[in-house]
Image (tube, helix red, strand yellow):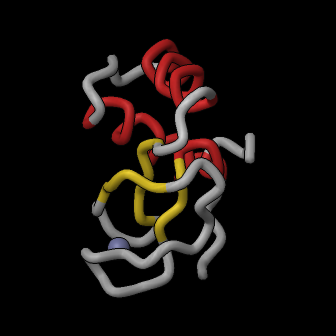
Amino acid sequence: MPALSKQERARKLLALAESEGYERNADGVFAMLEKSTYDSVVPGACTTCSYTCECEPDARRNYCEGCGGQTVQSCLTLAGLC
Ligand SMILES: [Zn+2]
């Protein structure tokens, strides 16, 4: 799995926050992460394509239905919190 740079992780988190109905800015990302801290299912995104889905909070290499890779990470993993 390719490692994402900080900028790529930030872009993924901003897009994920927007797709989850939060603002596409730092406040939106923080709100999404705060809510996800208390949930058993959280937003996740593929690290190689634009696919998003719900996943476990500690997901690091879940299957991606978009590209077929083991490339889906939770928002908490993308943020380096899990
Ligand atoms: Zn994918």
Query: Which residue is pictured at 49% across the width and 82% down the height?
Result: 70
Residue lying furthest front: 40
Which quadrant of the frame does ligand 1 lie within?
A: bottom left
- Quarter-of-image position of residue 43: top left
Q: Give above or below for 18 relative to 60.
A: above
- Quarter-of-image position of residue 45: bottom left
| Residue 30 screen position, x and y as percent | 56, 20
> Looking at this view, is 68 or 49 the one in front?
68
| Residue 1 screen position, x and y as percent | 60, 82
| Residue 44 screen position, x and y as percent | 44, 52
Q: Give above or below for 13 relative to 62.
A: above
| Residue 52 screen position, x and y as percent | 31, 55
- Quarter-of-image position of residue 81: top right
Residue lying furthest top: 27
> Looking at this view, is 69 or 59 the one in front?
59
Q: Give above or below for 32 relative to 81.
A: above
